Image (cartoon, rainbow, N blue to C red):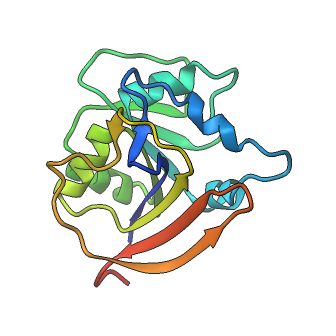
Amino acid sequence: MTKVILYIAASLDGYIARSDGEIDWLSILDTEGEDYGYTAFFESIDAIVLGSKTYEVGLSFDEWPYPEKKSFVFTQRYLKSDREDIVFVSDTVEQVLANLEAQGFENIWLVGGGALINSFLQHSLIDEYIISTIPIILGGGIHLFPPSSPEEKLELINSIQYPTGLLQAHYRRKGNV
């Protein structure tokens, strides 16, 4: 059975990016030798789903940030890539998730952005949430959970506090074992 995991960082006031999509503020926690569990998490997933704006942010890095994992980019625009590990999709989130399950993908990382996260939330398709709260108040930007998000009951699996001030909480959708 396919499991969708939202693994994301947010500011203390609940933003995942500045209004212009910038995520430069995440670098305040760059500490040599500390990856906040990212490597172990990345190794545990089979595929990635992300929105087209988040995809474009990934393209701005020196290297593609999700190598060796199949990335499914939700878009209504015509986009193309030379990479064989990137697939553009325009179906509904339910259809894409059903296709991923049929292809044998078990652990799916929902990277973002906000609109795509909300689409998954609208259909109760997020099984686990790993949210790293960054000790910064942005005062505005792209909401992790916009006001139109539906209610979702969660139970805490665990939490980790890091010396840098980052607090990472791992939740599971209630009744979803």
Residue 66 seen: no
Q: Residue at x 62, y 60 (%)?
A: 41
Q: Residue at x 66, y 54 (%)?
A: 38
Q: Residue at x 21, y 52 (%)?
A: 94
- Would you say 99 lies left or right of 50 here? left
- Would you say 173 lies left or right of 109 here? left
**Could you tell me residue 112's position as x and y percent?**
40, 42
Q: Residue at x 35, y 58 (%)?
A: 102
Classify the position of the C terminus by image quarter: bottom left
Q: Quadrant of residue 17?
A: top left
Q: Nearer the viewer, residue 102 or 158?
A: 158
- Would you say 115 lies left or right of 16 here? left
Q: Nearer the viewer, residue 47 or 24?
A: 24
Classify the position of the N terminus by image quarter: bottom left
Q: Nearer the viewer, residue 130 or 123?
A: 130
- Would you say 22 lies left or right of 76 here? right
Residue 35 seen: yes
**Could you tell me residue 57's position as x and y percent?**
50, 24
Which residue ends up furthest to the right in the rendered image? 33
| Position above or below: 55 against 162 | above
